[in-house]
Image (spheres, grey):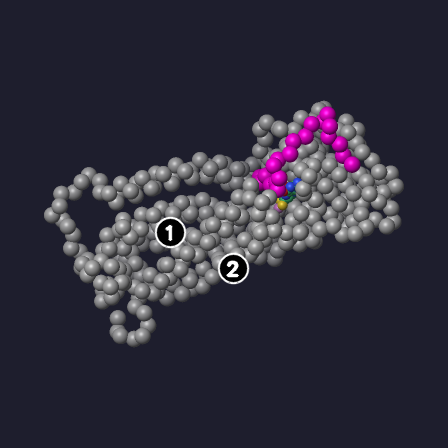
Amino acid sequence: MSGGKKPGFGKQLAELHRWNGWLVVVLAASGLLLSWGAARGWLGGGRVWVKQLHIYIGLVSAILLVMYAPLMRKHLKQLRQRPRQRGNLGFVLLLLIGWLLSGIVLWQFRHLPPRWASNALLVHDLLSWVGLPYIAYHSIVRLRWLRKPERRAIRPDEREGSEADGSGGRSPGIHPAARPQPWMTRRQFVKWSVGIALTAAVAPSFFRWMGKSVIGTGLPGGMADGEDANRMLPAPQPLPDSVNVVGGGAKGSYRVYTVTKLPKFDSANWTFTLDGLVDRPGRWNWQQFLALNRRVQVSDFHCVTGWSVYNNTWEGIPLAQLLAQAGVKPEARYVKFYSGDGVYTDALSLEQASMDDIMVAVLHDGKPIHRDYGGPARLIVPRMYGYKSVKWLVRIELIDTPHVGYWEERGYDIDGWV
Ligand SMILES: Nc1nc2c(c(=O)[nH]1)N[C@H]1C(S)=C(S)[C@@H](COP(=O)(O)O)O[C@H]1N2
Ligand SMILES: [Mo]
């Protein structure tokens, strides 16, 4: 290059590549941590910080893309005769741009319709399932010792070549062609082994995820079933609207969330309590609880992390009915909800709690709510984000001071309006 002070083209590319590599490592680590359901409990409030970090680093990676844009044309030209490396470059660029755009939607979900967020989450996850193993493969097989210098995709300029890539000044193109070729070189062997090992490690969970999130989308079901760990007898008798699943069947699928070990309930000792600042506190066993009047309601369910499940047919006891029966004392200001997991709680103001679509649900699409999804009874607050919908609900208490719920204490908005 003509001798200005600017670093040469090859050096610029190498720098960008190095920075991008490190950002991807941090993004992958934080992203995996965020999506790992079991980490929700011990990560606690740290989750909100990890999420902020993930967003900021993601935005920094956008700067790298912008810096790369003016170099791209020349880079592509340099790779003219290397279709595979061009393919790699194109794929990685698509990944980065896809992650960035879907990430921006997820970051700004509050200003966008929920369907955007759930589609963005799907894209973000899909790209991660495909992209992370690909990038892992790419970084392993391009380790210096595996690579012939003349085959590197990013090469310092001819002039700087000898110092920069440590190839000892060996000019590209000179090949130890005289040596007989084994049927498979060490490099090929390592590449294939790495590729097969990564695929084998990721494929099973990937297909399980596909089945649930991609194929599951649009199919009725919502909650996957399988053996229910709860033993609640008798099963609640569904009302006609529940039997007929008036909502047409839930669309989308729930992700099982918990901050504790999944609890387990038995009708022999399960109880439901309504107490605090009420005239007539109550405690019901399972049979008594099933004798309370229920209603059927169709609503959508949105989680702040981006996924939604549409057209749920819930059957349960309206919260307003429970409160009216108990007689709320004038000094009561808030309603606090306790999960039978012993840890999770949330609260609503009395005014919020009077919304007529809030219920303590026992049936979903005509079937008892499965243990994993909060059965035998869970709260449903359709107009607020999912974290308000306390699973394994066992107690409602009326109080006169605000209560900060589990996720609110860890950074979520107290006011959870969708
Ligand atoms: N007891 C309890 N209730 C909970 C949670 C939880 O971790 N524990 N997670 C909340 C959040 S953030 C969401 S989005 C929904 C998820 O419900 P699901 O696990 O049935 O998908 O439950 C809410 N209620
Ligand atoms: Mo959530």
Are circles 1 and 2 on residues that touch, CB within 8 Å?
no
The residues bearing labels 1 and 2 have C-alpha atoms spaced at a distance of: 23 Å
Labels 1, 2: front one: 2
Q: Which residue is mark 1?
A: 91
Give the prevailing secondary structure in the magenta stretch. Answer: loop
Q: What crowding class fits label 1: few (fewer than 14 Cα within 10 Å), some (14-19), or many (20 or more)?
A: some
Residue 315 image-quadrant placement: top right
Residue 56 is tagged as 2
Q: Is residue 237 above or below residue 327?
A: above
Disc 2 packing (10 Å; few <14; some 14–19; many ≥20): few
* Range drawn in magenta: 249-273
For residue 79, which quarter of the picture? bottom left
User: In this rendering, would 78 be left or right of 317?
Assistant: left
Lateral position of residue 80 relative to residue 404, left or right: left
The three-letter amino acid code for the residue at tag 2 is Tyr
Q: Residue at x 63, y 54 (%)?
A: 411
> Is residue 118 shown to the viewer in this render?
yes
In the rendered view, tell whether residue 142 sits above or below residue 297: below
| Nearer the observer, 207 or 193 | 193
Element under label 2?
helix
Where residue 409 appears, x then y in whole percent?
66, 51
Decide if residue 298 is on the left or right side of residue 59: right
Q: Position of residue 101 (x, y in %)?
A: 49, 56
Residue 350 seen anywhere in this rendered image of the structure: no
